Image: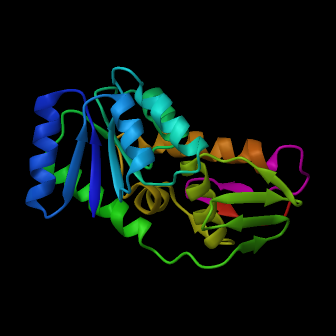
Amino acid sequence: MKILVVEDEKKIAKFIKRGLEDEGYEVEVACDGEEGHQKVLMGSFGIIILDLMLTNRGGLTFLEEMRGKRILTPVLVVSGRNKVEDIVAGLDAGADDYLKKPFAITELIARVKALQRRAGRDRGAKIFFGDLCLDPVKHRVWLNEKEIEFTGKEYELLEYLVRHQNQVVSRNMIADAIWEGGFDTFTNIIDVYVNYLRKKIDKGRDRKFIHTVRGQGYIFKDEG
């Protein structure tokens, strides 16, 4: 697998590149956002490792433009920004995972392998549940035949809930499935993303899809 590292701090870029190459990955490095953007458009990468504080094109802009062009390559953000709102902003822009600096190279490699496993899954045909239709290949969603826009992480959470319909799922189960265990502040982030989903698929409906099970987590079912 070829990995693109977009990082303008040369020591960090070299550290990441050497660690990944020791694991057998082929690695290219872009030293700013514009160079990274051009490499994404011209090349084929299995995973992108992206810093947010970039010159010439910020990391969030980089992500939003990628996803706007329907480029679905998994992205691991590495950033010194570690507040919940920073993590949510990165995931909202289209990141698949978020690793806070400083980090051990072993953790970065574990995150890369987790993304690699997820990207390689056979997701199969469209999923139908009540008035919902999900396309697991293109990450598109329709409610009552009207398409609704979702960020990458919103889509992953929705698909997980739909695939576990009528089952109670805890926050830990969601964190393990969607973020491979994740961050110290994951409980807050999961609640934030559940609220995002509710605004998009439950708002204005008498019969809700997402229900809170006090002290346990959530259940996805098509009833009031």
105 displayed left or right of 97: left
In the picture shown, does residue 4 fall above or below 21?
above
In the rendered image, is residue 90 in sight? Answer: yes
Residue at screen point 19% across, 27% down: 9
What residue span does the magenta drawing correspond to?
Answer: 202-218
Residue 143 location (% of width, % of height)? 83, 58
Q: How is the image coloured?
A: rainbow
Residue 61 colored magenta?
no
In the picture shown, does residue 222 fall above or below 185?
below
77 displayed left or right of 68: left
Residue 35 location (% of width, % of height)? 34, 33
Residue at screen point 63% across, 58% down: 158
Residue 58 location (% of width, % of height)? 42, 25
28 displayed left or right of 71: left
Direction top: furthest residue: 55
Residue 56 location (% of width, % of height)? 38, 20
In the picture shown, does residue 175 fall above or below 223?
above
Q: Nearer the viewer, residue 73 or 109?
A: 73
Residue at screen point 27% across, 59% down: 2
Residue at screen point 33% across, 39% down: 50
